[in-house]
Image (spheres, grey):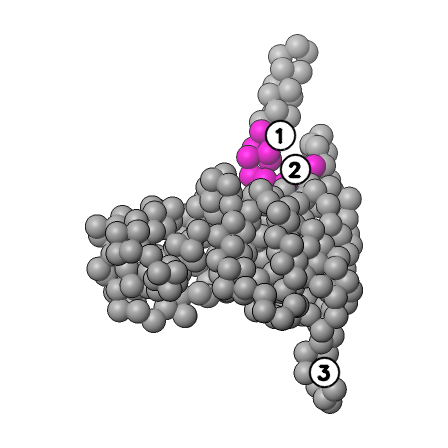
Amino acid sequence: MPIRLENVSYVYQPDSPFQAEALHEVNLVINEGEFIGLVGHTGSGKSTLAQHLNGLLKPTGGKVYVDDWDLTAPGVPLKKIREKVGLVFQYPEHQLFEDTVYKEIAFGPKNLGLSAEALTQRVKKALQMVHLDYDIYADASPFDLSGGEKRRVALASVLAMEPAYLILDEPTAGLDPRSRLEIMEQIGELHNAGITVILISHNMDDVAQLTERLIVMHQGRIIYDDATRRVFLNHAARLKEFGLDIPTVTKLVLALQKKGWQLRQDVFTVEEARDEILKVIREGQRHCSEI
């Protein structure tokens, strides 16, 4: 079942001198199985929107539905909602608190009343999903791990709840290039395993590489909601107006085009750029040999 937002608005500190509207009459449907990028300049409302998807925030206007549960209704089972819709905040390693990795990952599912054996299986499965060996990491202190390992443990603690939807807020922020690549590869694997992913990111390279649908927010409104490739291809200039960017390889392609290279415009990933450049080189070599 989808997540649905109907005319959702949200106002911070209403009826005060600091009142600010973060969302304005947002309508959105997120279907199971999608890989969505959610982007916007700082203050666009994207993180506020994400916190509505599992009931951390409730709208000041409109409705939010998860599996036909109205999150604004009294008595809604928020515990079940948050099992289904997992949210990983930016810098989640700052929220680690247990003295072992096992306890950290087991904390959430332990509250579900699982047996000791079932709980251990949840922890093992979650660690496997983020490529950490149970025998090596289970008894380790999360505070002794590297930044990338901490990030993966924090992700595993959410995956242990077996969510159908996974919201990731800037999952590679502050990581070194190797850890960033590892995290993005694992997120791709999670989607391939059947988890619906909503990726919030300022990194257009990550968005272009992985997501299939792109939602662009500006001043609390959804400006674009379309296939990722179409948004980059058709609205690159407007994205810059909104304080966003285009993928790095697309900038390279545009620079080469200005120098006379006959390259496609819809090149958004490193692999596509490599293939397109090699194709032009080979065609040039063939043309020279024919002459």
Residue 135 place in picture, x, y as percent? 21, 50
Q: Residues within 10 Å of mark 2 (few under 14, many from 20)?
A: many
Front position in the image: 290 or 137: 137
Looking at the rendered structure, the number of numbered marks drawn on it comes to 3
- Splitting the image into 4 quarters, where does residue 266 fall? top right
Considering the whole magenta stretch, tell me its main secondary structure.
helix
Disc 1 and disc 2: Cα gap in Å? 8 Å
In percent of the image, x 52 and y 49: which residue is there? 164
- Determine whether, in the image, residue 261 is placed left or right of residue 184: right
In the rendered structure, which segment of residues is drawn in magenta?
Answer: 266-277
Q: What amino acid is at disc 2?
A: Val
Farthest-out residue, front: 75
The circle drawn on residue 267 is 2
- Of circles 2 and 3, the one toward us is 3
N-terminal-most mark, 2 or 3: 3
Q: Earlier in the sequence, mark 3 or mark 1?
A: 3
Q: Is residue 75 above or below residue 14?
A: above
Q: Which residue is mark 3?
A: 14
In the picture, measured across the screen, residue 110 lies left or right of residue 68, that is: left
Q: Is residue 185 left or right of residue 231?
A: left
Residue at disc 1, secondary structure: helix
Element type at mark 3: loop
Residue hosting label 1 = 276
Residue 204 picture location, percent across and down: 61, 51
Q: Residue furthest bottom?
A: 17
